[in-house]
Structure formats: structure tokens, C-alpha cells
Image (tube, rainbow, N blue to C red):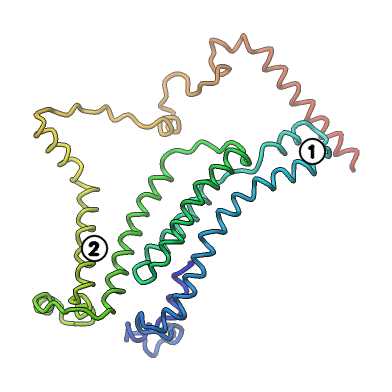
């Protein structure tokens, strides 16, 4: 949303899609700019740079602000909590949500990859965000936040896949950006494209040398992604094994720990907690009962306090 909405609103879609003329949709999307002309950089480009600068700093500052905020809250409320449980909660710190951090990361990453071909200044904001995110997250997790929850690899793998989508968008927009720049026309390529496509709306831009180089890079990236996610890894492993003269051992295909725990496929203990081991449970039974009694006493104290308040 940071860069997409402002681009859609300011674009003249009736020029690019004549079928929209005279329709309700066409009347709603009558922007000012037909292409990436000088006025587009003055209006849309300036707004994108301003929004990217804000997105590069504000999420990390908000995370780092949890550190001094934690000290202020502890200093103000440490003598006002009436139970040990509430006092422990006060000193635990705020919760670290990894999903929000990944959301901020993907937001600025996609904005930079989409528009950096025409606005190279965005690369600076990318470096600023990722370098400051490292230190802000490190300080916040070690000093201010409570211990994060245990995550599996699914969220990280998903974000990695989205980075490939961002590279595709970067190259696709790069073709369109560079096609607006005057450059040498590749006549041979123009002749070949005219044999395949009847309309020259897109082909007249692809035959410009800067855009054609980026377009060929885009095609190479698509082929690389298709092979890398299908038969590519298997072929490479077989080729390496053939060169080395060795045969690859067949893997057992065991699931990860989290998948096995979720599907109840673990045989035996699923935790290092010694109290969950039946062999040691009796030895810790008295301690467990003591902790349960203390927990009940805290609950009774909370109930008595609520009754007195009423």
C-alpha cells in the first residue's frame, strides 16, 4: 500500500486500457500521467521517497522505544502491584511479535524493489532500514522484550519465497522504466517481435537497448526459478555425483521436530523439561505440589482484592 495506491491513483488507465473509456471504472481512474514522465517524478516520485524514508525509520524506532519505556513502566508501577504474579509480569517486558517485523520488512522491500529502477535513492533507505533493524531488534530482544515464542521455519521460508516475487516485480518494472528512456533501437529484435505480436504497444518499448537487456534478465530469472523449484536441484545433485563418481545416499525423509510434534509422531519425550519425564516425576512431586499451592494462594489473593474493591 505504501507505493501501489499512489501509483494507481495518478495513472491514466484510459490511455493504457482503452476498453475502460466510458465506463464507471474508467471514469474513476483518470489520473494525470500516461507514463514515467518528468511530472511523475515530481508528484509520485517525491511522495514515494517521503513515504519510504518514514517506513525506513519508524518501525525500528518503535521497537527500540520499548527499552526506555520498560524502565519507565517498572519505575512507576513497581511499588503499586499487589501480587507477585503481576510484579513478575511487569518485569517480563513486552511481547516480541515476529509477524509484525516480517510485515515491515516485506513492506519496504517491495517498495524498494518496485521503484528503485527509476528512484535509486530508495536503495539508501533500504540499507538504513535493514542495518538499523538488526541493532534495534537485537537490543530490544536482549534488553526489553520477554523471551520470544518458539517459531518453526514456515514464516521464514514464506518470506524467502516472497523475495523471489519481489525480484520478478523489480525486473518487470525495470523494463518499463528503462523503456521510457531514449536508447538505440534493436532493429533485428523489432523485426522478430513484429512477426509474433500484432500490436506494437509493448514491442516498441522492448526493442530499446536498455529495456531489452533488463527484459532478457527477466526471462533468465523466470527460467532459473522454474528449474530451481522443479528438476534443477535433482539434476545438479546427479551431475555432481557423476563427476565425483559417487552415489548419493537415500535420505530417510524424516519430518522436522515441529511437524512431528504437531502430528503426534514423536516416540518418547518431546521436551527437555525433566519434570515431564516419568522417571523423575515422583522425585519432583513435592515441588510441583508446592508451586501449585502457591499459585492457588496468588489466585485467592487476587479474588480477595477484587471483592474488597467491590
The mark tally for this picture is: 2
Q: Position of residue 304 (x, y in %)?
A: 86, 33
Residue located at (74% from left, 32% from top): 85
Q: Earlier in the sequence, mark 2 or mark 1?
A: 1
Residue located at (51% from left, 70% from top): 50
Task: Please rate how many residues cluster around mark 1, counting C-alpha atoms within 10 Å: few if below 14, some from 14 to 19, many from 20.
Answer: some
Query: In 3D space, how far apart are the residues under numbered discs 2 and 1 (Cα atoms)?
Result: 59 Å
Q: Is 293 displayed left or right of 108 in the figure?
A: right
Q: Position of residue 297 (x, y in %)?
A: 79, 25
Q: Where 207 falls versus 77 (above or below)? A: below
Residue 257 has which mark?
none
Check the picture and name the quadrant holding the C terminus: top right
The secondary structure type at the circle numbered 1 is loop
Q: Position of residue 61 (x, y in %)?
A: 59, 54
Residue located at (41% from left, 45% from top): 156
Q: Where 184 falls versus 277 (above or below)? A: below
Q: Where 149 falls versus 108 (above or below)? A: above
Along the line of sight, the residue nearer the viewer: 16 or 175: 175
Residue 78 has which mark?
1
The secondary structure type at the circle numbered 2 is helix
Task: Please rate how many residues cluster around mark 2, counting C-alpha atoms within 10 Å: few if below 14, some from 14 to 19, many from 20.
Answer: many
Along the line of sight, the residue nearer the viewer: 261 or 221: 221
Q: Is 162 displayed left or right of 225 in the figure?
A: right
Q: Position of residue 169 (x, y in %)?
A: 33, 64
Name of the residue lying farthest toward the bottom: 22
Along the line of sight, the residue nearer the viewer: 110 or 255: 110
Residue located at (74% from left, 46% from top): 72
The residue to which callout 2 is attached is: 218
Amino acid at each position: 500500500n505504501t507505493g501501489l495506491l499512489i501509483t494507481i491513483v495518478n495513472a491514466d488507465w484510459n490511455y493504457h486500457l482503452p476498453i475502460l473509456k466510458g465506463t464507471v471504472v474508467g471514469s474513476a481512474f483518470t489520473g494525470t500521467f500516461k507514463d514515467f514522465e518528468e511530472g511523475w517524478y515530481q508528484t509520485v516520485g517525491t511522495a514515494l521517497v517521503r513515504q519510504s524514508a518514514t517506513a525506513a525509520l519508524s518501525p525500528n524506532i518503535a521497537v527500540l522505544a520499548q527499552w526506555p519505556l520498560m524502565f519507565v513502566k517498572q519505575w512507576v508501577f513497581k511499588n503499586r502491584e499487589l501480587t507477585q504474579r503481576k510484579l513478575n509480569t511487569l518485569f517480563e517486558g513486552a511481547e516480541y511479535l515476529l509477524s509484525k517485523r516480517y510485515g515491515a520488512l516485506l513492506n519496504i522491500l517491495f517498495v524498494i524493489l518496485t521503484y528503485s529502477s527509476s528512484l535509486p535513492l530508495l536503495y539508501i533507505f533500504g540499507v538504513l532500514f535493514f542495518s538499523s533493524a538488526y541493532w534495534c531488534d537485537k537490543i530490544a530482544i536482549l534488553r526489553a522484550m520477554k523471551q520470544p515464542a518458539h517459531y518453526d521455519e514456515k514464516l521464514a521460508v514464506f518470506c524467502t519465497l516472497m523475495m523471489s516475487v519481489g525480484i520478478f516485480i523489480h525486473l518487470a518494472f525495470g523494463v518499463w522504466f528503462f523503456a521510457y528512456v531514449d536508447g538505440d533501437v534493436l532493429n533485428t529484435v523489432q523485426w522478430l517481435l513484429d512477426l509474433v505480436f500484432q500490436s506494437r504497444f509493448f514491442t516498441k518499448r522492448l526493442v530499446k537497448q536498455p529495456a531489452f537487456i533488463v527484459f532478457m534478465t527477466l526471462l533468465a530469472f523466470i527460467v532459473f526459478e522454474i528449474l530451481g523449484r522443479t528438476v534443477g536441484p535433482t539434476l545438479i545433485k546427479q551431475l555432481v555425483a557423476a563427476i565425483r563418481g559417487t552415489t548419493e545416499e537415500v535420505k530417510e525423509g524424516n519430518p522436522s521436530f515441529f511437524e512431528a510434534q504437531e502430528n503426534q509422531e514423536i516416540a518418547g519425550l518431546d521436551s527437555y523439561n525433566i519434570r515431564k519425564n516419568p522417571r523423575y516425576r515422583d522425585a519432583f512431586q513435592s515441588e510441583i505440589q508446592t508451586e501449585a499451592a502457591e499459585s492457588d494462594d496468588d489466585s485467592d489473593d487476587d479474588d480477595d482484592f477484587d471483592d474488597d474493591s467491590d
